[in-house]
Image (cartoon, rainbow, N blue to C red):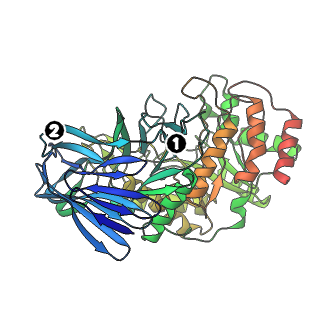
Amino acid sequence: MRITTTDTAYHLDAGGYRLTVSRTGPSAELEGWMTLSLIASVDPAGGRDETYETLPPVLVERENEAVFDVPQRSTGWEAKTVRLTCTPETVAIEVRVEGHGVLGDVTLLGGRAVLNTRAAGTFRTGLHARGLFNPTPTHPVQVVRPVSTPAALTVIGDASPGRLHAVFSPPPLVLAFCQEEPDGATAVPGGPWLGASVRAGIEDLTFTELRYEPVDGGALLRLDYECHTTVSGTWRSPAVVFRPASSPWEAITHHRDDLVAHGLAPAAPTGERHDWWSEPIFCGWGAQCARADGASPTELSRQDLYDGWLARLEEHGIVPGTVVIDDRWQLTYGDPAPDPAKWPALKEWIAARHARGQRVLLWWRAWAPDGLPAEECVTDAGGRAVAADPSNPAYRRRIRTIMERLLGDLGADGFKIDFTQWFPSGSHLKSYGETWGLALLHELLATMYEAAKSVKPDALMVTHTPHPAFGDVSDMIRLNDVLEYDHHGAPVPAVDQLRFRHAVAAHAMPEHLVDTDQWPMPSRADWLAYAEAQPALGVPALYYVESIDNSGEPITGDDLEQVARWWAR
């Protein structure tokens, strides 16, 4: 890197990027991409952090590294500094504070201030890019959106308006900017690109979501800590790392490699991969929905129906290596045991599948508190149970007992873990421990993962968490439910969504298997196109046997035989 200095700025040329750091105001120009605001806010609970004076940047040069510290006088903290760390490949921004408090919101690339010029209010980074890539599926479907459109990378969501953005929970925490206008729901423009990723390991992922908040040509990033992270002494935020890339896929690879290089994510899955994990899957949820006819599909997770569906598949040449018994085989979600009215002989049923060379996974609803005592749960202000609390030793002991019951006594072979996006969000919520945010979700999955492996070492754990730091609590990444429309209201082909999601998972966690999922399908034609593409993109999963739930179209024997040929090929 080459740095030249003038009276007003430091000029850094790293070859792959050029950066000009102002010596007179808290900003830096990342040439061609954005004017970085070097203001940040670290709001303590019940208060606001506002910068009321910025001091000139202090440059320290080290081998292959230049560090610019921008000290700021703060209303919320005894000391505050925004640090800009430059290497030949990357520019990283973080904020450091000293003092005591509990974290609310933290903003980077902008924040509240009264500048030395007396300009006041909220300041943001200026954007010169036109498109923003979002790695998490959203509804409406919009993979690359105008930079003026907000985005959220989060572990909180459901199907309600403004909340259907946690299909991956969590996704890789990386955004990417491009110079071209986006065109199409899943289209990705050509390069160049600029990746912006969060460098943090599990212990520092105590926020619930990262929000990209654009306004009138500017934007900032907001981390929501929900008043569950305590600062006592010195604290520093995760760093936002900028790096040029040829595509958003390379930006995701850079993110994953950066975490691995800093010891913040595993380089590979922690355990052995077993051959049976790669066998095609039959999951009964789609068949349950198609058969429901206005009733609740959860009432159709029944032993007799699964026997009939599997028999029909076998008649047409489909013998899945793995069978997923979906929602709701269990009496309660929180402390699951088989419902004897639906599965009167589940242990014997699993044994019979084993005798045929097949394995059986059980669907698991993450966070579910029903069936649990309140003292093992995250509770609200009224003392009601909101979610299972993995920070509680009593709940962790319960999980070990459940694993012995389901994997040991019943003989099941693993779990399809769903609903990780139902995180117990809220600043007033109470838990046993101090962990929160993405880190608490990791603790939940680690509790299950370790307990399952202790009972059955080849147990398969399937999650929809394609963040590289979650590589040690998952064996297979599920691509999750297919969405419907783009922001114009036009249908988005299911197979296009499959390819986008697979690319995200494959670049974020390249050593993990991918469950390609298959629900819901808008039509028979969409289903067939999706089924044909699946074997080349991961482990194929078949959800439908008799008809398509959304369209009511029947599935013929010829259709199933075609799927069998695709699987065989």
Image check: 547 left or right of 489?
right
Q: Could you tell me which residue is drawn at 42 percent across and 45 percent down? A: 154
The image shows residue 336 at horizontal and vertical percentages of 51, 49
Q: CA distance from mark 2 to mark 1?
A: 41 Å
Residue 529: quadrant of the picture: top right
Q: Nearer the viewer, residue 545 or 86?
A: 86
**Type of amino acid at the residue the image marks with label 1:** Val
| Residue in view at x 76 percent, y 51 percent | 535
The x, y position of residue 83, in whole percent, is 26, 60
Q: Quadrant of residue 426?
A: top left
What's the residue at 60%, 30% (across, down)?
484
Q: Residue furthest front?
A: 6
Q: Residues within 10 Å of mark 2 (few under 14, many from 20)?
A: few
Q: Which residue is mark 1?
A: 167
Query: Is residue 416 in sight in this rendering?
Result: no
Indicate left or right for 514 with 394 as reference. Answer: right
Residue 97 in the figure: left or right of residue 66 = left
Q: Which mark is residue 88?
A: none
